[in-house]
Amino acid sequence: MLDSKELSAQTWLARLERSAYALPLLFLLSMAETLIIPIPIEAILIPWMLSQKRRRWSIASVALAGNITAAALGYWLGALAMEQWGDTLIGLFGGAQAYDSFVAEIHDNGFISVLAVGVTPTPLQIAMLAAGATGYSFLLFLLAVTLSRSVRYFGLVILVNIAGEAALKLWKRYSKQIGAVLLVLAGVWLWFLFN
């Protein structure tokens, strides 16, 4: 017999499976994660991939497409708006110290720096702004983002394929706790953002 936690997680996943808007919504959420929300989208991707064996590669591809689109927008935001709104943008995405540090990193290690940020769960916002503001090659920037996020999302598909049912059982058991932690993190981030 299923307990209420398992039932609510299964209901959510079943609704997601039936929705015609699920993949477009994922695209938009992936863009939002890249541009403004510093919470990794894996919290959505993992349970969805676990419940959607046939669509795992599609899910990863849509998340990647949203991420690349947002990275391109962030790059051009850095290139075009840093002079006028730089202080505000930098304040939103980590502060002047993080920005200055990444600008130095772009000058020293360019492609590898963007590649490293894209693989880790580190928010990509500062890298996008710094790459655009410093005039780093747009094509190399997009290539680094594409490669790094491909490793991240398609690696997640491979991990889910390997972990399978054991991972799904863990998700079903702790989905509410994970959701609560993510909600608290979002609240803390918003509090720091507007105070």
Image: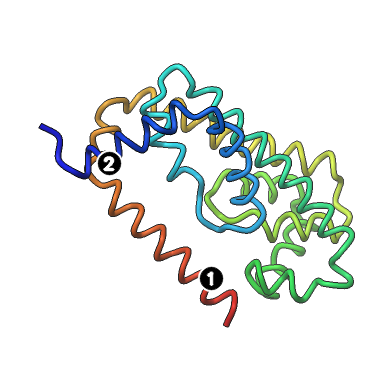
Label 2 belongs to which residue? 8
Whether 74 is drawn above or below 28: the answer is: below
Residue at 62%, 38% in the rendered image: 27
For badge 1, the amino acid type reads Leu
Q: Foreground: 3 or 35? A: 3
Q: Residues within 10 Å of mark 2 (few under 14, many from 20)?
A: some
x and y percentages locating residue 89 in the rendered image: 74, 69
Residue sitting farthest toward the left: 1
Quarter where residue 65 is shown: top right
- Label 2 element class: helix
- Answer with left or right where residue 25 lies relative to residue 159: right
Label 1 belongs to which residue? 190
Residue at 30%, 39% in the rendered image: 9
Quarter of the image containing the N terminus? top left
Quarter of the image containing the C terminus? bottom right
x and y percentages locating residue 79 in the rendered image: 87, 58
- Answer with left or right where residue 72 lies relative to residue 157: right
Spatial separation of the CA atoms under disc 2 and disc 1: 27 Å
Residue at 59%, 51% in the rendered image: 33
Mark 2 and 1 residues: CB-CB less than 8 Å, in contact?
A: no
Q: Foreground: 105 or 42? A: 42
